[in-house]
Image (cartoon, grey):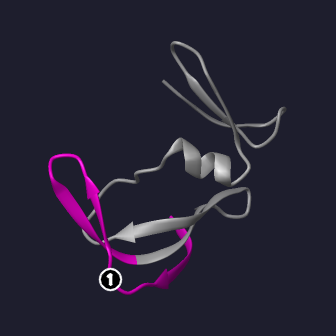
Amino acid sequence: MFLDLKPTEGGAVAFGGMGKGKIMGIGKIGICSLAFLDNTLYLKGLKYNILSISQFCNNGYIESFDKDHCIVKIDNDKSLFTTR
């Protein structure tokens, strides 16, 4: 969910399968003020969120990996989420 979204002019993002998405805005996504990512692009017609590990790193989150999981933490003691 976008907490803040500013319209932007032009630009596109290329992704798998030779697809492209037109950039319609840039903003902040997240869960209230608990956790968020700045400078996230809104693409016209895209039905899924495409986030990168570098976005989490640039926003001060800590990531750790093992063979089965990725854990994203707010700090060393507070886990934000875990994925397989």
The structure residue drawn at horizontal position 44% and vertical position 67%, both measured from the top left corner, is 41
Q: Residue 60: horizontal and vertical position, in percent?
A: 74, 50
The amino acid marked with disc number 1 is Gly
Secondary structure at numbered mark 1 = loop
The structure residue drawn at horizontal position 83% and vertical position 33%, both measured from the top left corner, is 76
Label 1, on which residue?
10
Region in magenta: 1-24
69, above or below 46, in the image: above
Displayed quadrant of residue 62: top right
- Nearer to the camera, 55 or 48: 55
45, above or below 31, in the image: below
Q: Residue 13: horizontal and vertical position, in percent?
A: 31, 63
The structure residue drawn at horizontal position 40% and vertical position 51%, both measured from the top left corner, is 50
Relative to 30, is 75 on the left or the right? right
Residue extending farthest left: 18
Displayed quadrant of residue 71: top right
